[in-house]
Image: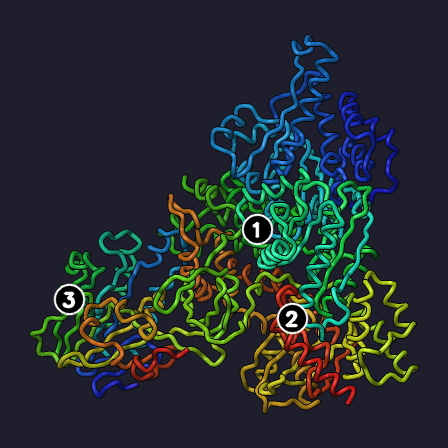
Amino acid sequence: MMLTEEIELPDGLPVAHIRSLSSIAISDLHLGYEGMMARNGVLSPKINLLKIKKTISKALDTTGADRVIVDGDIKNEFSNVDVEEFNELYDFITYVKGTGADLVLIKGNHDNFVERYGKSFDLKIYRQEAAIGDYLFFHGEEMPSNSSNAKTLVMGHEHPAIGVYNKSGRKEKLKCFLYGKYMRYNLLVLPAMNYFSTGTEVNMEPKGDLLAPIFKKLDVDSMRAIAIGYGSTEDFGKVGKLRNLA
Amino acid sequence: MISYAGKPFSDAESIAVLNPYVKDWFMKNFGELTPPQKYAFKLISERKNLLITAPTGSGKTISGFLSIISKLFDYSLEGKLEDKVYCIYVSPLRALNNDVYRNLTLPLEQIYSEIVKDKGEDILKGNMRKVTIGVRTGDTTQQERRKMLLKPPNILVTTPESLAIILNSRKFMEHLSGLEYVIIDELHELANNKRGVHLSLSLERLKEEVGGRISLIGLGATLYPLDEAAKFLVGSAASSTEDCVIVDASWSKKLDVVTRSPVRDLIYTDGQKIEDEMYKMVNQIIKENKSTLIFTNTRSGTERVVFNLKRRFGYGEDIAAHHSSLSRESRMEVEDLLKKGALKCAVSSTSLELGVDIGAIEDVVQLGSPKSVTRAIQRIGRAGHSYKATAKGEMIALDRDDLVECTIMLDAALKKHLDSFRVPEAPLDVLAQHIIGMSIARKWGVDEAFSLVRKAYSYRALQRKDFDALLNYLAGNYVGLESRRVYGKIWYDEKEKMFGRRGKMAQVIYMLNLGTIPDEVAINVFDLNKKWIGNIEEEFLTKLKPGDIFTLGGRLYRFEYAKGMKCFVSEAKTSAPTIPPWFSEQLPLSFELAEEIGKFRGSFASVLSASIKKRRISRVSKSTKMPAEVKKVLSQLPMDENAMDAVFRYFLEQILFAKEVPNNKLMLVEQTHDIEGDKNYLVFHALFGRRVNDTLSRLFGIVLGEMLDMDVGILVGDNGFMLELERESKLSQKAVEELFSNVFSSDIISTIRLNIRKTEMMKRRFRQVAGRSFMILKNYKGWKISVGRQQVNSQLLLNAVEEIDPDFPVLKETYREVMEDVMDVPRAKEVIERLSKGTIKYKFITTQTPSPFAHKTLTFGHADVIMMKNKHDYLKELNRLVLKRING
């Protein structure tokens, strides 16, 4: 669906297509997540990267974009990189480059290491935030700088989702985008692309429990939730209206 | 070959096989042989494999042990007794282990000192030694274990889990080289579950490891079919050495049982009055007997009964509760007091049903139906401690279905018709554990390992492809090479068809995570301000949907939502809960008992119908007398006058109102509605037991939902199930026929599988299976992972596993467990087949108000007899409507 004239949200994908930049924006990949699970004694099949590659390929195909912007947390662990994670990272970067698209990384709170590899992979890496065209990309664990000329802010970090009840009373959790206003900017919050992250239900969680500091300055209830699931993308309206549904 | 023991041996023959000192000890202490002993002494001395079933108090333990002890003293006197384990005794209960240890320590001492006295101290200079006994369970300290490693006991008393650990302790296994006997106690508590299957694999590994022949002795209370139990005990290996003789002494105790109703009219008597009369009845029984044991089915019921008896009749410390939520210490205290005869009465949910010796109980009272004949017999068998005593028991029922159920249950018990158990069929999670255990012990050829596993009865039909899939999973072949050092639990060479140990961690991880019993989980309940209120059982949470109202700590709450292991609620303003607190505790009615009830319904209804016709009965009132020919039928059953009267009226009302009594050959499908009339109900009067009904209700619900393209509510009960539809969607005869024909032509397994996938139960069971299969490690690198964490992880894991392979062993086992062990898909399939062939008929009727036999299913699928105030009023109202229609 078209979120604005500029921003397209391809059906069923946790991806935003920004036309003027010919880019797709994604966030919170948390590569190496299964490794973390395994260290906690849960031995899951490696499915995250597999799904991410499929999603990116589909998004690039449908949108014709030629740049992939990762809005932070490409990798799961805070500091160390072990062999498996390095392999996944390498695999991911090689994959994206193989599609012919450019890759831009914005550093998230989990990404302390990536600069070290920036050179060897020939990557564009932004430490904090990146102003590209009319857009300011930042991960979200800190406030964006206020000096920007950007019109739209794009962030990740929060892993937004909504909880809704279906007819038989069963609760379903759907990943979603959030879109609204912050000061003079438009604000787009990207859902987590990580397969295992089901997200935080922004319509159920008390507001004070949200992660990103920007939600201390802005009422999440005023934002629209655009949910993804079952192969489609659907505008559910204001978050405030989705509270106390059950 | 499995055979049944013929005539018992004479006492003289039996005693003759014993060592003279053991014989003297036995005769001095007991004087005569109990029924199982008349077979066991001789057969065990001949080293036969033996399955003995006998009631409590029949000297079962001694019957299993005495010939072995005798043999060990023979060895001792010959100077041949070594520091080796000759006999392993396994029971599922640690308390029972301690009991056995205590009860054998003294005789071993006494016999030893008799020998020394008789032969003189000089004998000690030879190699004459004490016969020793030792316990090894999860409670055994490291120090005791080390001691045992240096000097192993001749008789080792242990649990299935500790036995599995021993199998992987190389040093201890050296002490088992002379093992001759394995005794498995409480076989009825093992043969029907994964814990037992785990044990049976351990036994096969043990036999293989020890090499020499081991005699297997199984001890159990009532269970059926016995051949199946025997096969479970000795395994499925075809060789003639695996013969097993069955000694069935389960009926050596006489039963004196009756079903009672506290009042004549269970419908129109005030609920309070019924309760008063019930407690009076119970109190009378307690007074008339030296000691009484009361069973209540649920823990909450146990607490209520104890509270009421104390409050109403002034009992004090002479009454005590015993259930699984109480601490181990307080339970042991109650057991001790019972043994000493210091308690007038003990009240229990299920925890005193089996196991430890509780001394002489004179009368067993069962409040409400225990739902299975076997369970009824086990409970009543607690009365009358000696095998010569008669076991006296009474069942008190508070509604008419319960009266019928309890009566038929006792009748079946008297006729020795039992419900059957089923050994779980080749569970892959249990097998995964053993493959890891085997790999740690040594290198295996895949063929060799496969044939060993198939010797265990549960795995007799294990498919090779499932075994190979499991090896691949355990080798970590579902992830890339570089990750296998973390994921792989075994080393597996697919080409050479060999597997073995992988890495140093394997042993530690194995020891810390082994076992089949899932962790108990308490779900924390919070209000919307995140204030903690209390906790509920996980099982209970899986049944809740938003809007449901339940009680917690005496207050009513409305369920809002759940997040992981947290449950959020708001205060409810209504007066009644929609989900009763005992919901998840209620035992399911067994298939066999349901069928017996169905048979009775059929035969009694035809007698009664004839009588109604002959006597032209068309109305029913308080003064309606029971015809003689009807009374004749009922008085042959174990029920009191009140019960007979209530059952007579119950059937009379049903026949006059609906013309039909649903029975084992007739499934009645009744379209009706509620008193409020805002819903349309389709009540299926189905007597196949709850687990089959659970399956059938889903199947019919799904198919009907597809036909009408709408949501269909489902409610499952013991006497049937109910589909709930919108008021407008009335079904015609034709639509019902279509429903049945669609069900007949549907693919039952895949329909149910799809339905199961969406349930909370699936997620929970998957976590448990993944835990047993070591896909989720509860205990890893020194961390204990909380169940909550496990649950969150397991949901992610479930999706991921499904994504890579819908036939992944861990997933496959979860579906099997839900379909075969929780529900009963195999039998449900049978029922559907019989319906489609017409050997069970169905009939569709529409009623203006629900027919009497539908009331229980309608009021609640699951009901607790002890607390039924709100339900009682509702029932009364329903009955009033019925009578109005009959009497005009």
Q: Nearer the viewer, mark 3 or mark 1?
A: 1
Percent coordinates x, y for residue B127 in the rendering: 66, 14
**Residues marked 3 and 2, same chain:** no
Kindly identify the amino acid type of the residue bearing the numbered disc 3. Lys
What residue lies at 58% left-to-right and 41% top-to-bottom? B333
Q: Is residue B592 at least partly visible in the picture?
A: yes
What residue lies at 38% left-to-right and 77% top-to-bottom? A229
Badge 2 density bin: few <14, some 14–19, many ≥20, Cα 10 Å: many
Residue B115: quarter of image: top right
Kindly identify the amino acid type of the residue bearing the numbered disc 1. Ser
Please indicate whether residue A224 sits to the left or right of residue B706 in the image: left
Task: Measure how far apart labels 1 and 2 are at the Cα level.
Answer: 25 Å
Q: Is mark 3 on a helix, strand or loop?
A: strand
Kindly identify the amino acid type of the residue bearing the numbered disc 2. Gly
Percent coordinates x, y for residue B568 in the rendering: 41, 68
The chain letter for the residue carrying disc 3 is A
| Disc sitting over residue B717 in the figure | 2
| Disc sitting over residue A124 in the figure | 3
For the N terminus of chain B, the image quarter is: top right
Which of marks 2 and 1 precedes in the sequence? 1
Q: Nearer the viewer, residue A221 or B312?
A: B312
**Residues marked 1 and 2, same chain:** yes
What residue lies at 74% left-to-right and 51% top-to-bottom? B380
Badge 1 density bin: few <14, some 14–19, many ≥20, Cα 10 Å: few
For the residues bearing labels 1 and 2, Cβ distance under 8 angstroms: no
Q: Which of marks 1 and 2 is in front?
A: 1
| Disc sitting over residue B324 in the figure | 1
Please indicate whether residue B789 sits to the left or right of residue B144 in the image: left
For the C terminus of chain B, the image quarter is: bottom right
Percent coordinates x, y for residue B526 in the rendering: 40, 64
